[in-house]
Amino acid sequence: MKALARSFPASAATASLVFLTGASAMMDEVVWQRYLARLLGGDAAATAVVLAAFLGGLSLGYWAFGRLARRVSRPFRAYALAEAFIGLWGLAFPVIFSLVESASAGLALEPPLGLAFQGFGLAAVLIGPPAVCMGATVPLLTQALSRDLESSGRVHAVLYGVNTAGAFLGAVAAGYVAVPELGLPGSLRLAAAFNLLAACWFWLAPAHSFTSVPVQSRPQMSAGRSPVAALLALALLNGFQAMGLENVLVRFVALSVGGSTYAFTMVVGMFVLAIAAGALLAGRFSRLGLSAMWVNQLLIAALLLLLYPALDTWPYWTHRLRLVFAPTLAGFWGFQAAEFAALALVAGLPAMLIGAAVPLIFNRLRSDLATVGALSGRILCANTIGNLSGSLIAGLMLHPFLNNGQIYLLCAVLALFGAWLAAWELSRAARWGTALAAACAVALIPSNPAYDPQRFMVGTFRVQTPLIYSQLPPGAFYREFLDGAQGLFLEDGPECSAAVVRAPRQPWHPEAPLAIMVNGKSDSSTVADMATLRLLAHLPALLSPGRARTLVIGMGTGVTSGQLALYPDVARIGTAEISSSVIKALPLFGAFTGNVHQDPRHAVLHGDAFRILARSAERWDLIVSEPSNPWVQGVDALFTREFYRLARGRLAPDGLFVQWIHIYDASATVLGSVLETLKTEFAHVRVFMSQANDLILLASSADIADARLEAAAATLASNAAVARSLEEIGLGSLESLLAREIAPPPLRGPVQTLDMPVLHYLAGKSYFMGERVAARELLSGEVAREGTNADARMLLARRVAARREGALSRLEAQALVDSAMDRRGEEVVPLPLSGALGRRLERLMP
């Protein structure tokens, strides 16, 4: 901090507070995004609306406070008022949000127009006012702290750099510590404390505490023939390039390490830290000549193009790096630090040069000490509008036309266009040479050379132990790793990267398995997950009093929706899916779904499931929730108490809610958290083991009546298609289906709420450490009830007691034990429930 104080024309305390306000701004942005996801949804369109409101407000603030900077006589107090407003708004935000949420309950927010206009209006009301005030920092303080024109460049660069470095702290704190430990309201209070501390300091500190750094006497610079419009356009282009590059780096890292919040935090943290370093470095060279901007942009383009041929090897190198760290908590943090360092090593330098652009433009345009604050506001306003445009266009609109590699190349092209703008004052050779280089780079985009998107189809992050070919070079590694896998569909969509992969035919199954891969992770397979996908449909459809209206949350392969279509009395099948790319892939699974995409009863509901349920008055007899794993970013909202409450409110009075939970990467605490949260909203929760890695939770407000068991048997007897579907997964009777029920394990975990979203972070660490709930923990409910009459409450016992034939024969009991097998490999593997099931069946025999 002493070194910072020597280069910063103010006290070390001032520098520290500027740093902390940058941290608070980033923390607020992260938390506001989570709050607004409840209102607007968490899909790409809703996220874009929130970002537009935030960045739009910030750019307006830069412009407004830049104009104000030359008019106020006490800029420090004006800045103090702005920070005080941000802090007080943050403290009151939960109450403000609750009021807006209640007032907007009647809005449909239907995409695209309803979400765009109504959603933007709500986001502007909620986060627009503080975002505008966040634009006060650099313009007001640049004007206040600049003692002469010569020092203004350094003042502006260091203010911008220190504030941006604070954003790094905010991103890391929010992503790793504040949100999981303090929750959303607690994180807002922490951020507000930073704002209010800064407000008190700048209001109360005497003017002489803001010391200036002596500089050598030098004539004031003049912009002369400086092209203000061209350089402001360059600031805008630089902002577009920055956000476009950040977005595509997030995609590459997610495909390499897994799409968790940790991956997002890592990229954003690295990027803003590098931008801060670039700004601070530019502040030390305020006398650079006319060619500085031109060289800056050329270097950005050159570095990006040099990195481009290695992009499709990132998953390979991540796999190699992952093997260095033990599957422990210390290993988790070590891996996060190593990934951050590796990312900074390969992408940090171009990000630093992007960060240097704003101070360089300021240095070139400053001409009058009285207007340095206004100039800072104009440049940052243009740069933030570029940020907004880059996020919307590169992050959303380009994906139907370009893949991730092509968007990355576009960022390099934009740097060359920036160099062309910066070269207007230089020689004709510089201008024409830059234009020629840009044209050559543009020609690369359609062909996308030296980039193989199939290397991102299957994530190497799923492999946590060494492979016999892990040490091979990248090309040989991928040949072995993909092992004949065929990509039938590949798309880098706005929400995710999706692929349909056909794996080689296995000797133990007649079909070559197809899987839908989302960001490199299988979200369901037509072989490995078939038992679960079918039971997700048949368990509730057979046991529910009604099944006319059904909703499936998460499309995957579409098998669950296709199985529901086997019931002729199902009148409507809604499938909610957040990814447009996954929706496009549905017809490829037609052989496994019965071509449900052509069934007139089937409707795809594109968007965030939270918004779909909250903004629709439809009632459903069945709601089947089959999201991805809780460690995947955005999925944890579907495991919250608020979501379960919403689902319960949208069910018919006797409706059933079904939850798929993966247990192959879930610890006892993760599974306990899901169970505990579900029980807060549903009085009855039954647990079924569909196969060795999956549980199905069947929840309802009223218990399943005995009459439903008899009706289920009648349905099976009369519906040959449903009976055949169950027989194909080894379940030839209603009794074998009910035999998959286990007693709810008495596991404990924190209740997951939107305000305290802990599950995602627990699941992320659990996944890295390879934890999974042990069989003895999973069946601890069975052990706990030995010697009691708890068996009488199990559906199988109730079914056997009601049968006309009476108790089970020994042959029937053995058949039920045999059905409790996981037939996914060459050998039949007993499920963990088999032993407990055998003991239970002994009590059901004469």
Image (cartoon, grey):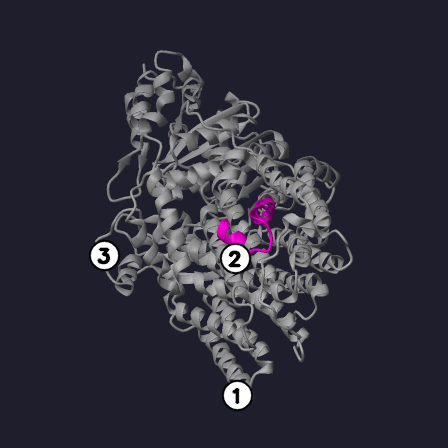
Q: Which residues are magenta?
A: 1-29
Where is mark 2, residue-wise?
276
Residue type beneath disc 2: Ala
Q: Which quadrant: the C terminus? A: top left
- Measuring from the top left, give residue 227's x and y in whole percent: 66, 77
Please give the name of the residue rendered at 38% of the width and 11% of the height, measured from the top-left corner: 788
Measured along the vertical axis of the image, is residue 458 above or below residue 37? below
Q: Nearer the viewer, mark 1 or mark 3?
A: 1
Marks 3, 2: nearer the viewer: 2
Distance from disc 3 to disc 2, alpha carbons, whole Å, reads: 40 Å
Q: Is residue 838 left or right of residue 735?
A: left
Count neighbours of disc 1 (C-alpha within 10 A) and say few if under 14, some if 14 to 19, many if 20 or more: few
Residue 684: x percent and y percent? 52, 24
Q: Nearer the viewer, residue 684 or 812?
A: 684
Where 99 falls versus 354 (above or below)?
A: above
Q: Real-space Cα distance between discs 1 and 3? A: 51 Å
In the rendered image, residue 744, in percent from the top left (x then y), is placed at: 43, 24
Specify the quadrant of the image occupied by residue 481: bottom left
Task: Inspect the magenta stretch and tell me whether residue 14 lies in it.
Answer: yes
Secondary-structure class at tag 1: helix
Q: Residue at x 38, y 54 (%)?
A: 341
